[in-house]
Amino acid sequence: MSEKNREGKRTARQKLAAEREKQKSKDRRRRALIVGASVVCVLGLAAVIGVIGANAGKDDGGEAAGPVVAPSGAQGKDSLAIPVGKESAKSTLTIWEDFRCPACKAFELAYRDTIHELTEAGQLKVEYHLATIIDGNMGGTGSRKAANAAACAQDAGKFTPYHDVLFANQPAESDDAFADESKLLDLAREVDGLDTTLFQECVKNGTHNSWVEKSNEAFTSGGFGGTPTVLLDGENVYQDRSMTPEKLKQKVLDANK
């Protein structure tokens, strides 16, 4: 073989070796980019999970939701009903209400005395369910905070009188006055024995906020048309426009014969 041919083969081998080294270098860079991109994806996913975790359990008021703490004596599915009246009563009135709801106030002012008369006589048991639809429709947190305060009053055995005071002092629908905890605490002074340190802490800490939210979820998933929703032994009596307190009383008495 001539020297010229040998030199040509050496040159070809060198070029081939150089190409192989160049390809290896490209492969190393590609693997590095893939690993780097994978790390970025993992970090990005971790960041997303972190954001979701940070925001999970926050309600509309921006406060972290706590455990669901039902008020004392709550009954029914998921302990979402606050009972008033004797357990032995034959008739049950189920009421879904929102403390910011003007129609709820109108119902309460019209029917309250009759309902009290029937519950005190052992003829009727009432199950109150609290909703927060006005917060959702108008904005704010007054429905939820008032409902929490009412649940706190239930803990103290003062639900009925405080419930009545809240409706008697209901602000205009667009006025989120019940979002001010000091307002709720001031109204508690109108109920004998309610303005205690325990009640104040329960209101300020939002002890039953998550329970109120769970109750509102049950309302929205229940297919009800709005608040108030009033059911006498399952019959929607509030939809009957001819219904009056006297007719409601008679229906209860007839059912109990």
Image (cartoon, rainbow, N blue to C red):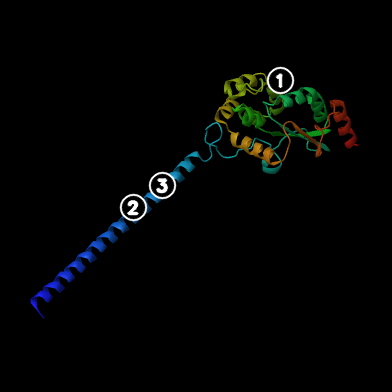
State whether residue 37 is above or below residue 104. below
x, y percent for residue 253: 88, 33
Disc 3 secondary structure class: helix
84 or 231: nearer the viewer = 231
Q: CA distance from mark 1 to mark 3?
A: 53 Å
Q: Is residue 60 visible?
A: yes
**Residue at numbered disc 2:** 36
Tag 2: amino acid:
Gly
x, y percent for residue 240: 83, 32
Q: Quadrant of the N terminus?
A: bottom left
Q: CA distance from mark 3 to mark 2?
A: 12 Å
The image shows a total of numbered marks equal to 3
**Residue at numbered disc 3:** 44
Q: Judge left or right: residue 99 versus residue 94.
A: left
Disc 2: CA contacts within 10 A as few (<14), some (14-19) or many (>=20): few
* Circle 3/circle 2 CB separation < 8 Å: no
Q: Judge left or right: residue 238 versus residue 206.
A: right
Disc 2 secondary structure class: helix
42 or 210: nearer the viewer = 42
Seen at 21% across and 68% down, the residue is 16
Q: Quadrant of the C terminus?
A: top right
Disc 1: CA contacts within 10 A as few (<14), some (14-19) or many (>=20): some
* Circle 1/circle 3 CB separation < 8 Å: no
Q: Which mark is residue 168?
A: 1
